[in-house]
């Protein structure tokens, strides 16, 4: 009986500790999970409004399908089917995301019936011409930075992350406001080595979808150029039951209509 | 007791909180800046897309065999897609006004005239592991970048050389495509019931070196050909068996048909011929270092007796090796080496008529591609150069495009041919070097 009491005591202490001070790695991993690995798979219609410093606007619209290989928050597959602008309509961009090496990427050009293999590029370049980077859309490896909790209040953990390889990225560090209730990063600010804010992300709207808190509107700003991109997620679904073979050459050439409507 | 407690403790882990208990972040950004969610247009009962463009180009030098204008056309493309249950119908056609061509009669296979049907097909999956596409379609496979070894589907070299969009390098085929998926192994079988030739350089657009006359020939004297055109008898078959090993994509290819551009001559009429051709090939493509590498080879087995017939192109071995990677921000570079190796070369030499131009046994070709994107990818600069050290000739393609709006783009470019000899592959097109500009509106 004594042993049992002690065990309970120890356990409850452990849980209390984890709930308050929280291991920074746990916070970061949870944030990564709720941002990029909700459900076994997911689909959404994404619209982007890309606005330059002079207020000129460009639009993008695509359907994104995502499937996790397993539940370890590791490898994933993405299928991006473009609707707008008209010159890229029906083009498909496919990614097999790897953690141990560069991602595998393909582009399908329907007018040529061409399946093109694309060299894995710098993850920190523009995704489809927007101010979001590839890495913002598919996630940044949690082990690529060292993390520390700078501050903590009732609502947020403020986590500072510093890249282990500073030459691989354009920033010196970034700060993440991670919401305690949901673990969603609500704001991210990137700084250069002078401590100047160069880029920032803001979640503008969070909705509960199939039990998953989901950012459905967000903004990425580039403070150096004055440009920004607004991103909107609609028709979001989780656990759609996407078959793995959707993410193959067969479905690049023949779009899986029932999952794209 | 212990179990119950553990269970209760587990219950409060974040993952298992029920929706009602989770407090969502509040007081976030100002949503009024977001665009109004677009009301879906009730519109058409089918999916419509296309573009309207004008494209004008001029030769850089004088060519006595051609007009000064290399291209001058107004083109409207209409694409219609419609699904009925499990069938998808697709129709894409171009309508064009083209004052550069003198001939305006309609040729749906040669792409001549006011209408060029690019696609008219139906796609369906009769079995879980089978996709079928019947009708006019654009077909592409293989690993080369603007180099084709095992892709023996029709090309339109005229469009390519006068500055039309890259998509026009591919001419449509009237074919039945069956794609079979057996898990790891996949098989494509394409049957073309009547031979579809390339839209080859015949002089009407681009002048070329005529070996028979020993001089340049152009629109006053276009190439005449005996085209195999028997339905179900003069047909083509192409197959590809492919499989991935991790990130590496491998494929085996087979083709049975005819040389796609004239590769022989009828001695009596002097007309060009399309001798029989079989191709056996293989390719592999995958990540290497920071980029993508590819290797492709093919054995071109020409018609029987080709080696002793000076009027039929010999069998060949072809090879390409390529590598592409990102070399800077929004800058991609690609290099390729390509070889055409003439087989039975001794016999070719022995049967070559007196005084005829003697081709080398090997044609070596290097290509370089550079693509740079600027201004949030609205501005695109690209360069593609073919250079052959064995032929001492080459071909430089320059292209720049800028998107004024999402739907409106201006383009300019050039096709520059150079070479030491007038009879070499690219050298013969020297007088056709041209520049062009286009205004393109998508809908």
Image: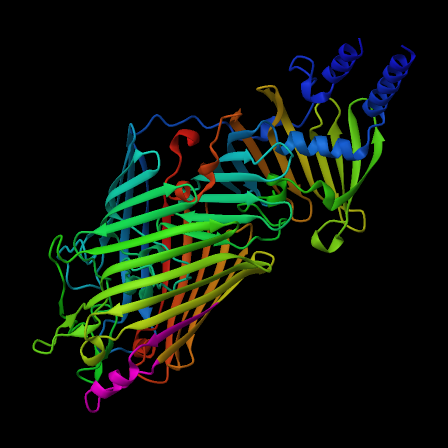
Residue B151 appears left or right of B175: right
In the rendered image, is residue B404 in sight? no
Q: How is the image coloured?
A: rainbow
Residue B109, quarter of picture: bottom left
The vertical placement of A20 against A71, above or below, is above
Residue A182, quarter of picture: top right
The location of residue A154, given as percent across then percent down, is 81, 22
The location of residue B10, given as percent across then percent down, is 74, 17
For the point 14% across and 58% down, which residue is it?
B234
For the point 42% across and 44% down, which residue is it?
A91
Q: Does the segment drawn in magenta span residue B73? A: no
The location of residue A77, given as percent across then percent down, is 54, 39
Residue B180 appears left or right of A15: left
The vertical placement of A206 against B311, above or below, is above
The location of residue B187, given as percent across then percent down, is 34, 48
Question: In this orientation, which residue lies closer to the viewer: A56 or B182?
Answer: B182
Q: Which residues are magenta?
A: B336-361
Residue B49 appears left or right of A190: left
Question: In this orientation, which residue lies closer to the viewer: A68 or A226?
Answer: A68
């Amino acid at each position: 009986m004594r042993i049992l009491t002690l065990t309970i005591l120890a356990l409850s202490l452990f849980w209390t500790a984890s709930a308050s001070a929280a291991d920074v790695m746990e916070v970061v991993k949870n944030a990564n999970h709720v941002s990029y690995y909700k459900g076994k798979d997911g689909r959404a219609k994404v619209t982007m409004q890309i606005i330059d410093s002079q207020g000129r606007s460009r639009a993008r619209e695509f359907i994104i399908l995502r499937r996790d290989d397993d539940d370890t928050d590791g490898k994933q597959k993405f299928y991006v089917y473009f609707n707008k602008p008209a010159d890229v309509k029906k083009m498909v961009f496919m990614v097999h995301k790897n953690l141990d090496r560069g991602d595998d990427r393909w582009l399908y050009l329907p007018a040529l019936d061409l399946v093109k293999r694309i060299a894995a590029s710098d993850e920190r370049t523009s995704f489809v011409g927007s101010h979001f980077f590839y890495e913002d859309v598919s996630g940044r490896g949690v082990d690529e930075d060292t993390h520390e909790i700078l501050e903590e209040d009732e609502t947020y953990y403020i986590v500072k992350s510093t890249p282990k390889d500073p030459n691989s990225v354009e920033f010196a560090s970034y700060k993440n406001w991670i919401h305690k209730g949901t673990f969603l990063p609500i704001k991210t600010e990137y700084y250069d080595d002078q401590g100047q804010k160069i880029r920032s992300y803001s979640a503008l709207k969070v909705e509960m979808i199939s039990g998953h808190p989901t950012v459905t509107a967000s903004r990425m700003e580039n403070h150096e150029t004055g440009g920004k991109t607004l991103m909107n997620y609609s028709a979001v679904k989780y656990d759609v039951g996407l078959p793995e073979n959707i993410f193959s050459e067969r479905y690049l050439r023949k779009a899986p209509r029932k999952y794209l409507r | 007791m212990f179990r119950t407690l553990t269970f209760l403790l587990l219950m409060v882990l974040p993952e298992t909180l029920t929706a009602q208990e989770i407090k969502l972040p509040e007081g976030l950004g100002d949503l009024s800046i977001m665009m109004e969610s677009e009301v879906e247009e009730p519109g058409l009962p089918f999916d419509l897309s296309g573009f309207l463009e004008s494209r004008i180009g001029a030769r850089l030098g004088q060519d006595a065999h051609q007009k000064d204008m290399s291209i001058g056309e107004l083109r409207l493309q209409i694409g219609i897609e419609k699904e009925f249950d499990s069938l998808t119908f697709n129709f894409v056609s171009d309508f064009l006004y083209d004052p550069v061509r003198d001939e305006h009669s309609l040729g749906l296979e040669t792409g001549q005239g006011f209408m060029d049907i690019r696609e008219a097909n139906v796609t369906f999956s009769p079995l879980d592991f089978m996709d079928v596409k019947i009708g006019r379609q654009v077909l592409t496979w293989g690993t080369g970048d603007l180099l084709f070894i095992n892709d023996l589907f029709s090309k339109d070299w005229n469009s390519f050389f006068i500055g039309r969009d890259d998509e026009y390098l591919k001419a449509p085929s009237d074919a039945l495509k069956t794609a079979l998926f057996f898990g790891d192994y996949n098989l494509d079988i394409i049957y073309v019931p009547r031979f579809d030739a390339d839209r080859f350089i015949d002089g009407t657009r681009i002048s070329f070196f005529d070996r028979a006359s020993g001089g340049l020939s152009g629109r006053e004297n276009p190439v005449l050909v005996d085209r195999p055109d028997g339905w179900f008898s003069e047909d083509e078959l192409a197959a590809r068996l492919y499989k991935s090993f991790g990130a590496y994509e491998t494929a085996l290819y087979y083709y049975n048909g005819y040389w796609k551009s004239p590769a022989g001559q009828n001695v009596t009429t002097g007309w060009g011929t399309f001798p029989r051709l079989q191709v056996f090939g293989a390719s592999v493509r995958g990540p290497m270092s920071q980029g993508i590498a590819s290797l492709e080879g093919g054995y071109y087995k020409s018609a029987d007796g080709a080696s002793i017939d000076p009027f039929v192109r010999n069998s060949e071995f072809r090879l390409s090796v390529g590598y592409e990677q990102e070399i800077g921000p929004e800058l991609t570079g690609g290099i390729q080496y390509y070889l055409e190796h003439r087989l039975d070369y001794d016999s070719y030499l022995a049967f070559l008529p007196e005084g005829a131009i003697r081709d080398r046994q090997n044609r070596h070709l290097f290509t370089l591609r550079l693509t740079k994107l600027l201004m949030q990818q609205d501005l695109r600069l690209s360069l593609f150069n073919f250079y052959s050290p064995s032929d001492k000739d080459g071909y430089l393609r320059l292209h720049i495009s800028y998107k004024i709006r999402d739907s409106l783009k201006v383009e300019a470019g050039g096709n520059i041919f150079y070479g030491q000899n007038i009879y070499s592959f690219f050298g013969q097109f020297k007088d056709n070097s041209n520049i062009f500009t286009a205004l393109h509106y998508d809908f």
